[in-house]
Image (spheres, helix red, strand yellow):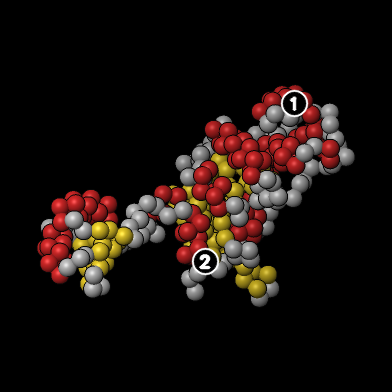
Amino acid sequence: MELIKLKGVEKAYRKNKILHDVNLTIESGDILGVIGKSGSGKTTLLNIIAGFIEPSEGETVYISQQDGKEKDLHRNLNKIKRHIGFTPQHNSFYPRLTVEENLWHFGRLYGVDRATLKSNIDSLLEFTKLSNHRKKLAEHLSGGMQKRLDISCSLIHKPRILILDEPTADLDPILQKEIIHLLEEVNKQGITIVIASHHLESIDKMCNKVAIVHKGTVHSHGLMADIKKSYQQDHFIINVASGTQKEQMIRRLQMHPFKKIIDQGHQLAIYPHDVEKTFSHVMGVIKEENMSLNNMDIRNPSLAEVFEKIASEE
């Protein structure tokens, strides 16, 4: 089910255009990763999704779960705030308050009634493994525990969507894994997650969808597997010892449709329509003809590899 849609969104400050023609859909249950180079506009995009700033053009639409009707998010801020939690890059809790006092404070800001708030605090402290630290000042917590507190403050009102900006920044690899695991558990509770991060390996592992922000627009958006597949290596190269072997290979390949074959002397560069199917056929021929294969990689590229290719585009 669709939760939030951005339609033709633009954002400019005076003559400086930050975002342009952004179209994006966030669906219930997603863990959506938002990635982009510094200055690409991804933080501005997060703030628009959260309703903190309004687009200069276009619209952000919130899909009501109750009646299925579309409503302009920025005309219903009071209602939407009850459904969205936001965790900024830098700590938003009060360091001189205890863990429990911080949760009481943020719960009241969201208008949660006292009885519900008490129940929410107890369950959150248990869920985030902060129960034994509830009376401790926030400033005395470790870095990982402080991040858990920050996330807890964003979850205190039981939002439908949790938005996070660089939640694993400045954490060591072990703490990064702990926070990622926590967010995965949050998602299992039915909370949709939108997360912006420069840690592409973390995004790659935990997100089912990704939005790649490049030059102020969403360059690519969709299922992680589909985005990667579109950047999958589209050819492979085989070595041929003689002209006879080359002719044999070309003749055998004609049994399977392909885009083109480039003769590179003692090598053939093969561009098939279906890489995996043609590769399987070629492996059988290579074994029969005693040829050799090199430069073949039909795995999906990593998110980092995809991002590098997009970031290098002019």
Task: State the residue position of label 2.
Answer: 311
Image quadrant assignment for residue 46: bottom right
* Residue 310 visible in the displayed image: yes
**Could you say where residue 116 lies in the image, as x and y percent from the top left?**
72, 26
Secondary structure, mark 2, is: helix
Secondary structure, mark 1, is: helix
**Could you say where residue 268 lies in the image, as x and y percent from the top left?**
24, 67
Q: Is residue 218 left or right of residue 232?
A: right
Q: In this view, does 13 lie to the left or right of 23?
A: right
Identity of the amino acid at label 1?
A: Ser
The answer to which of marks 2 and 1 sits earlier in the sequence is: 1
**Which residue sits at x=77%, y=25%?**
132
* Residue 49 visible in the displayed image: no
Q: How many labels does the image show?
A: 2
**Could you say where residue 260 lies in the image, as x and y percent from the top left?**
22, 68
In front of the other: 254 or 15: 254
